[in-house]
């Protein structure tokens, strides 16, 4: 990424703080320029050593040096407070912007990119970008001001000495260019490896219970150890080039200082310049050396920040879903009440993978309760993902009340649909906040009605803090059935017109399932309900049953019709009846 492109990308983030940044740069100008006065005072004091007025003036010289030093300290503090403060604000704004963008990216993005990689970009990479707008900017400004003022004073002292001190300068751009490219390359390698480590740690912490259950602690430690060794190796490659920079700068500066000292000593003896001028010139050369030393550090910061910004920019280049946020021009949610239709729908997740659904056709009328059944991998969850527009069909049309989903924004579809996913998600928060996550109403009556349908009204009230009970990570202090029913209650509180339930009773016993179904089906006719299930007890209560086989609908009808057809459903009924009889012995 070029510096111009980097500036264009970052400009919208620092422009709101341009006044504060300008004030910080003015403080930088004041501190750096005041610093240049001190060597001149030393020159005057040294040249005045042999005069009769030195004793009378020494107090003034000391007072002047102290005044300049205190002023420099004050401006340095203000400079760092303002400029570093702006960089921290930009860091926060950039992180918020990434988070907002990540939330509106399609499901397919999360199929390709790990959560650990995203976390790495939102933490480590943003910190590297901040360093450009903070320390790097300060040092660049300090270098420019120091070069201008120090060279100006050096030219006043002696033009020939100044030209001699500039002999090493032509070598510096070549060194900067070569080192900068190497630092950028190795920095990218380091950041990518750090993202892998972050992903590994995040996955292990998320799945710590299965790791411990299978005694795989040593295996996972070895895996992370290998990644860490690789990270160290790549960091050492980066450090090798960063480490070369300062010694090379020291060498060039040392050569320059030696040459200047040789000529200064010669010219002082010959009377061409005074001792004070020599002292001041060497001080200005020392002042000039530090910014030049820091250039290597700044080049490293810019290259690392540029590589980090490239990784962050790749997130922003991902196109968000159509209409993931509220908008006035959206089709009103109430217009979605009606039929769902799949017409010649084909779908596959990747171009090189086989079709999950192929020439799938069916329709569901408003108010129907439909059970979807089929073998594992037959495409049941995919079917629901197409209804919610999490994915678009590869070919064919999915319509809601006549509106093709590929022409609709996601926001109104999600407002219309209530989803209970197969993968249960419980947040580390209170039970109440988990229930009200996305709820349209905080009415206690509505809440208790949802808990009653989910058969949780008595269980949660028996907890010491009732609905204010704080749940551990991923709801560890709830049973699998309680978490599943909590998810059901959360969906009901959305009060959506279309309910999609993906295997909602897999973690509950038959009696609990029966109790929930009796209450859930009381709203039959008011809401369209699609239930993915493997249990006959759920399917037989539905208005219709759809059987998914070989990428399409192989059977469609109610329980009695499909039993009479003697197909997949009838065979499944016989097997589950036999299993129930065996369990009863």
Image (cartoon, helix red, strand yellow):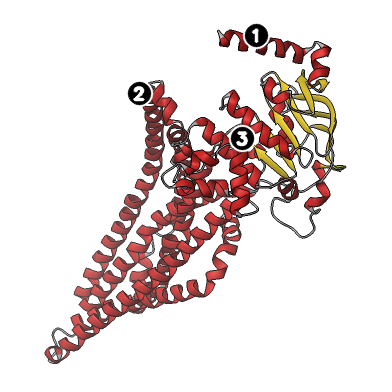
Judged by depth in the image, the label closer to the viewer, 2 or 1, is 1
The residue at the point 48 percent across, 73 percent down is 20
The residue at the point 65 percent across, 48 percent down is 104
Splitting the image into 4 quarters, where does residue 108 fall? top right
The residue at the point 67 percent across, 42 percent down is 106
Which x, y percent locates residue 229? 37, 31
What residue is shown with label 2? 218
Judged by depth in the image, the label closer to the viewer, 3 or 2, is 2
Judged by depth in the image, the label closer to the viewer, 1 or 3, is 1
Residue 236 appears left or right of 311: left
Comes first in the chain, label 2 or label 1: 2
Q: CA distance from mark 2 to mark 1?
A: 44 Å
- Secondary structure under tag 2 reads helix
Residue 496 appears left or right of 25: right
Q: CA distance from mark 1 to mark 3?
A: 43 Å
The residue at the point 37 percent across, 43 percent down is 239
Which x, y percent locates residue 331? 81, 53
- Secondary structure under tag 1 reads helix
Comes first in the chain, label 3 or label 2: 3
What residue is shown with label 3? 112
What residue is shown with label 1? 578
Residue 7 appears left or right of 529: left
Which x, y percent locates residue 97? 58, 56
Q: Within 10 angstroms of label 2, few (less than 14), some, or many (20 or more) residues?
A: few
Q: Which of the two residues, 465 or 3, is positioned nearer the viewer here?
A: 465
- Secondary structure under tag 3 reads helix
Q: Which of the two residues, 483 or 301, is positioned nearer the viewer here?
A: 483
Splitting the image into 4 quarters, where does residue 500 fall? top right
Q: Is residue 377 visible?
A: no
Comes first in the chain, label 1 or label 3: 3
Vertical relation: 166 (above or below) 433? below
């Amino acid at each position: 990424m070029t510096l111009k492109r980097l500036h264009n990308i970052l400009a919208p983030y620092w422009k709101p703080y341009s006044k504060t940044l300008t004030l910080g740069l003015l403080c930088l100008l004041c501190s750096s320029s005041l610093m240049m006065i001190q060597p001149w005072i030393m020159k005057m004091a040294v040249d005045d050593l042999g005069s009769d007025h030195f004793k009378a003036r020494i107090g003034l010289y000391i007072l002047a040096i102290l005044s300049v030093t205190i002023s420099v300290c004050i401006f340095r503090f203000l400079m760092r407070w303002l400029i570093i403060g702006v960089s921290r604000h930009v860091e926060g704004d950039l992180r918020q912007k990434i988070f907002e963008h990540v939330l509106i990216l399609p499901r397919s993005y999360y199929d390709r990119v790990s959560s650990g990689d995203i976390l790495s970009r939102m933490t480590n990479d943003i910190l590297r970008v901040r360093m450009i707008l903070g320390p790097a900017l300060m040092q660049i400004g300090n270098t420019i001001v120091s070069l201008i003022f120090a060279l100006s004073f050096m030219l006043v002292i002696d033009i020939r000495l100044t030209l001699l001190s500039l002999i090493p300068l032509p070598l510096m751009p070549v060194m900067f260019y070569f080192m900068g490219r190497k630092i950028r390359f190795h920095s990218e390698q380091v950041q990518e490896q750090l993202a892998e480590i972050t992903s590994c740690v995040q996955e292990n912490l998320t799945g710590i219970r299965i790791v411990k259950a299978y005694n795989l602690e040593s295996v996972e430690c070895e895996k992370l150890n290998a990644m860490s060794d690789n990270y160290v190796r790549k960091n050492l490659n980066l450090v090798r080039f960063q480490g070369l920079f300062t010694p090379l700068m020291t060498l060039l500066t040392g050569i320059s200082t030696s040459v200047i000292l040789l000529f200064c000593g010669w010219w002082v003896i010959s009377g061409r310049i005074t001792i004070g001028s020599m002292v001041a010139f060497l001080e200005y050369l020392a002042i000039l050396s530090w910014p030049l030393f820091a250039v290597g550090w700044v080049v490293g910061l810019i290259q690392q920040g540029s590589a980090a910004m490239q990784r962050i920019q790749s997130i922003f280049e991902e196109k968000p879903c159509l209409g993931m946020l509220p908008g006035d021009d959206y089709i009103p949610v109430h217009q979605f009440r009606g039929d769902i239709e799949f017409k010649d729908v084909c779908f596959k997740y990747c171009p090189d993978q086989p079709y999950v659904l192929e020439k799938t056709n069916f329709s569901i009328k408003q108010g129907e309760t439909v059970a979807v059944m089929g073998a594992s991998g037959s495409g049941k969850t995919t079917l629901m993902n197409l209804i919610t527009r999490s994915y678009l069909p590869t070919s064919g049309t999915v319509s809601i009340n006549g509106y093709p989903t590929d022409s609709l924004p996601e926001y109104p579809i999600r407002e219309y649909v209530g989803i209970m996913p197969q993968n249960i998600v419980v947040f580390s928060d209170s039970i109440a906040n988990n229930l009200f996550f996305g709820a349209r109403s905080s009415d206690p009556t509505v809440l208790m009605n949802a808990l009653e349908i989910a058969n949780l009204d008595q269980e949660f009230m028996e907890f010491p803090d009732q609905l204010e009970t704080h749940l551990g990570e991923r709801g560890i202090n709830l049973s699998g059935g309680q978490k599943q029913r909590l998810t059901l209650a959360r969906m009901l509180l959305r009060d959506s017109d279309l309910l999609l339930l993906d295997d909602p009773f897999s973690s509950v016993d038959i009696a609990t399932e029966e109790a929930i179904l009796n209450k859930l089906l009381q709203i039959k006719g008011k809401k369209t309900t699609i239930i993915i299930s493997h249990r006959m007890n759920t399917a037989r209560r539905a208005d219709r049953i759809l059987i998914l086989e070989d990428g399409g609908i192989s059977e469609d009808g109610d329980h009695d019709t499909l039993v009479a057809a003697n197909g997949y459903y009838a065979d499944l009924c016989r097997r589950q009846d036999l299993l129930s009889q065996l369990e009863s012995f």
